[in-house]
Image (cartoon, rainbow, N blue to C red):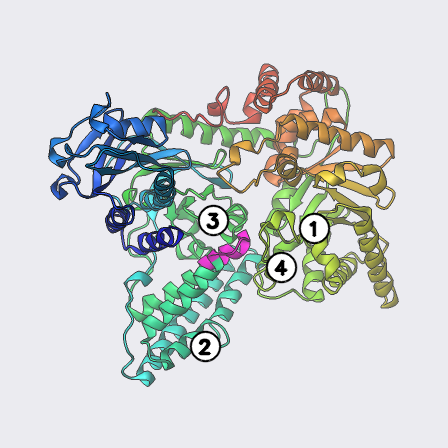
């Protein structure tokens, strides 16, 4: 049975379109189970009806015409119960509904299984027989397994719009799609779908007739693509920081003979024409990258595909972008790559929506540096039905609203206007200290990683850098940066913020952050080789980075070094040994630097209970609230399936944070916190009440947090915290904090007015 199941799944996945996949499914299931009928009914949610979309055993002319209401018949009963129904005499069941157009009356045995994807009911698959018998448990389990596989196929078809015409165009009413925040903000504009310039699926294999001619054609296409990449790079130099520009160097190297080009030539020599050879090589690499667990490496699949399609476009003399670009375009695509920012004028891009990607993809990083509201990972987005429609990109909630009602548009336009006015108001506190109404002082630092962050951080009055992500310069290259390259990058950060302290986190890769030239393959990357574990295993990488930091701090001495993902005292000891070794080396080489303070990040539960041991070995500690929340709750914060379980206000998270700050203060060790909690005015109030005196956040959050903390007293914050300790539910805690701050007249500084009093899971979109 397992081999049969595997074969059916392979055939379904290989089908060119949804209709073919459904036909394959019903035919193979009918044959494998030895039944007389197999049918698939898909649910049109807008019409609230099931449509017969494929069958073997019923009348073929009924396909597309036979229909049932959501609650009608046994099919409707399967859907409403969301579980299999197995009957030996279906006509005797009170819910049985005879459809004359299908000719199903003689069939007694009935087994129906719901088709569900991410809690969404998509349809029902049914098998029937004339004889009266109950299908056995093995047959039922077989059909349930196939249904789960079919659900993914149907969901993808809905996402890409390939089921257009089955139910008719139903995009005329407001519809909401959920994704992951790539860059915060709100944008309203017209949908502009970016399609690949060519489609590999349409490229056949052909025997090569003239290898020399094929090679010349390929070389000409390569030259034109290289010229495009260089032109894009030049345009990017006007809008993107140097770190992001390095991406185009990676693209060029991928075209070298020792990379993609060499493999393509080998396939041509083996007898396939150049377009077929290109397809073989590119799709092989794309499949390999997409199969990887690491989120960053999966993102490289889009880079390979983008390059391959550019080559194919020249081979087929296609154009990259042909449709006119709206003035306020919401750029959409299955997999948006960073080159879109130079393919389309920046001033025309209002927002971005991508079916794939994560908050850590190249595109998200660049979008944040340019301040473009972005939502990624919108897995069920019907691209082909949206061209030209009005969209709202809600980068606060990670949502996209299609064809919103005018009232909703007015509400979101009010948010945009409100945020613009609020930004002007917030600027009045830029040069003021972050001090509560009763005189308590809080230090506000920023998290940085791109040079684009520096100016905005300084303009908003940042008092220092609480977290500089050193992995960013590593991620945008195709090799490890040299000591000199690192030194120059770090020097820019240190000089920009001098004399304020700059806390540089040592290379933090692994989990959802990896390097294309240093791949990490693991079943559970978040629980594996990441952070300090990697760099201690590779002292040659760690020492070069520390040396670069030390040289960069010469004559400035505002450097602080921070160690990520520490879980034991032994790791601190080993790291300190290497840091002192690097320090002595640069002194011997003539550097005039002071030994910097060294701190430890508290990100894993094990570290929470070792604070007093850790502070004996280091100068300060900093809580990484994002990872700590993720590990305490066992929730991948980048996984939209469990996004609702990632709760910063969870009682266990708050209690862990209080334990950390209490333990550190007892030992007289400075403690700070960086991450999303520090940048949320609501949680910032609670953190201040716990005893955190330094908060580090993104520059975009700094003035908002400062404004709110300047409007409350420490005493009031501590009273609020005491109330919170009595609560056992994250949603209740969050709502209570919102209510208290609303009563203090600070609601608009916490979230846009539209969202006040509404759950983030219930957007103001008509049902």
Report the residue at 82% width, 55% height from top.
574
Q: Secondary structure at mark 4?
A: helix
Q: Which residue is mark 1?
A: 496
* Label 1–label 2 contact, CB within 8 A: no
- In the image, the segment drawn in magenta is 290-302
Position of the C terminus, as image quadrant, is top left
Q: Which residue is mark 3?
A: 357
How packed is label 3: few (under 14 Cα within 10 Å), some, or many (20 or more)? many
Relative to 688, does residue 468 appear above or below in the rendering? below
Please state which of residues 737 and 236 is positioned toward the viewer in this rendering: 737
Question: Of marks 2 and 3, which one's residue comes earlier in the chain?
Answer: 2
Q: Which residue is mark 2?
A: 262
How packed is label 2: few (under 14 Cα within 10 Å), some, or many (20 or more)? few
Structural distance between the alpha carbons of marks 1 and 3 = 32 Å
User: Which of labels 4 and 2 is toward the front?
Assistant: 2
Question: Of marks 4 and 3, which one's residue comes earlier in the chain?
Answer: 3
User: Which of labels 1 and 3 is toward the front?
Assistant: 3
Side of 589 relative to 542 (left or right): right
């Amino acid at each position: 049975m397992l081999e049969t199941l595997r074969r059916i799944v392979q055939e379904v996945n290989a089908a060119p379109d949804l209709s073919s996949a459904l036909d394959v499914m019903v035919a193979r299931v009918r044959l494998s189970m030895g039944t007389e009928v197999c049918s698939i009914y898909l649910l049109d949610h807008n019409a609230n009806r099931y449509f017969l979309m494929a069958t073997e055993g019923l009348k073929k002319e009924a396909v597309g015409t036979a229909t049932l209401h959501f609650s009608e018949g046994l099919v409707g009963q399967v859907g409403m119960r969301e579980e299999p129904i197995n009957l030996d005499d279906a006509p005797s069941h009170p819910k049985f509904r005879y459809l004359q157009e299908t000719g199903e009356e003689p069939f007694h045995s009935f087994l129906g299984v719901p088709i569900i994807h991410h809690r969404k009911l998509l349809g029902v698959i049914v098998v029937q027989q004339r004889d009266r018998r109950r299908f056995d448990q093995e047959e039922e389990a077989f059909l349930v397994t196939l249904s789960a596989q079919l659900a993914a196929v149907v969901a993808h078809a809905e996402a890409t719009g390939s089921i257009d015409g089955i139910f008719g165009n139903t995009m005329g009413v407001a519809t909401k799609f959920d994704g992951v925040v790539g860059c915060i903000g709100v944008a309203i504009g017209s949908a502009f779908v970016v399609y690949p310039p060519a489609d590999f699926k349409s490229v056949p294999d052909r025997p090569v007739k003239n290898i020399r001619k094929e090679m010349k054609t390929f070389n000409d296409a390569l030259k034109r693509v290289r010229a495009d990449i260089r032109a894009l790079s030049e345009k990017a130099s006007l809008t993107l920081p140097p770190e992001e520009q390095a991406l185009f160097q990676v693209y060029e190297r991928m075209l070298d003979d020792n990379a993609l080009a060499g493999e393509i030539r080998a396939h041509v020599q083996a007898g396939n024409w150049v377009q077929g050879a290109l397809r073989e090589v590119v799709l092989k690499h794309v499949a390999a990258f997409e199969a990887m667990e690491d989120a960053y490496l999966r993102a490289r699949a889009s880079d390979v595909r983008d390059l391959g399609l550019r080559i194919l476009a020249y081979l087929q003399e296609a154009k990259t972008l042909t449709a006119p670009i709206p003035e306020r375009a919401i750029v959409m695509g299955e997999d948006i790559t960073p080159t879109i920012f130079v393919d389309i004028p920046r001033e025309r891009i209002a927002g971005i929506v991508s079916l794939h990607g994560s908050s850590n993809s190249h595109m998200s990083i660049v979008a944040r540096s340019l301040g473009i509201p972005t939502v990624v990972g919108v897995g069920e987005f019907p691209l082909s039905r949206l061209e030209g429609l009005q969209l709202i990109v809600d980068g606060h909630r990670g949502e996209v609203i299609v064809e919103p009602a005018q009232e909703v548009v007015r509400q979101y336009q009010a948010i945009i206007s409100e945020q613009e006015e609020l930004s002007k108001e917030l600027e009045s506190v830029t040069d003021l200290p972050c001090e509560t109404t009763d005189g308590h002082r809080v230090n506000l630092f920023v998290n940085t990683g791109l040079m684009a962050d520096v100016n905005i951080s300084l303009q908003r009055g940042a008092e220092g850098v609480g977290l500089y992500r050193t992995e960013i310069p590593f991620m945008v290259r195709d090799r490890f940066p040299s000591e000199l390259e690192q030194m120059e990058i770090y020097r820019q950060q240190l000089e920009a913020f001098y004399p304020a302290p700059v806390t540089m986190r040592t290379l933090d890769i692994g989990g959802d952050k990896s390097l294309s030239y240093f791949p990490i393959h693991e079943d559970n990357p978040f629980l594996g080789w990441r952070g300090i574990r990697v760099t201690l295993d590779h002292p040659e990488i760690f020492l070069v980075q520390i040396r670069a930091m030390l040289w960069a701090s010469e004559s400035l001495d505002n450097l602080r070094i921070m160690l990520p993902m520490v879980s034991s005292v032994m790791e601190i000891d080993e790291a300190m040994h290497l840091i002192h070794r690097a320090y002595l080396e640069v002194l011997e080489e003539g550097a005039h630097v002071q030994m910097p303070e060294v701190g430890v990040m508290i990100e894993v539960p094990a570290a929470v209970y070792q604070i007093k041991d850790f502070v004996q070995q280091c100068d300060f500690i900093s809580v990484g609230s994002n990872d700590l929340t993720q590990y305490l709750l066992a929730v991948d914060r980048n996984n939209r399936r469990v996004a609702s379980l990632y709760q910063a206000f969870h009682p266990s998270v708050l209690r862990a944070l209080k334990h950390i700050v209490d333990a550190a203060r007892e030992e007289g060790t400075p403690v700070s916190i960086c991450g999303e909690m520090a940048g949320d005015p609501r949680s910032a109030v609670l953190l201040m009440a716990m005893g955190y005196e330094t908060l580090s956040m993104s520059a975009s959050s700094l003035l908002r947090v400062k404004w709110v903390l300047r409007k409350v007293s420490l005493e009031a914050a501590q009273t609020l915290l005491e109330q919170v300790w009595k609560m056992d539910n994250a949603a209740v805690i969050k709502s209570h904090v919102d209510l208290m701050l609303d009563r203090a007249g600070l609601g608009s500084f916490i979230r846009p007015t539209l969202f006040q009093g509404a759950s983030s899971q219930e957007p103001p979109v008509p049902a």
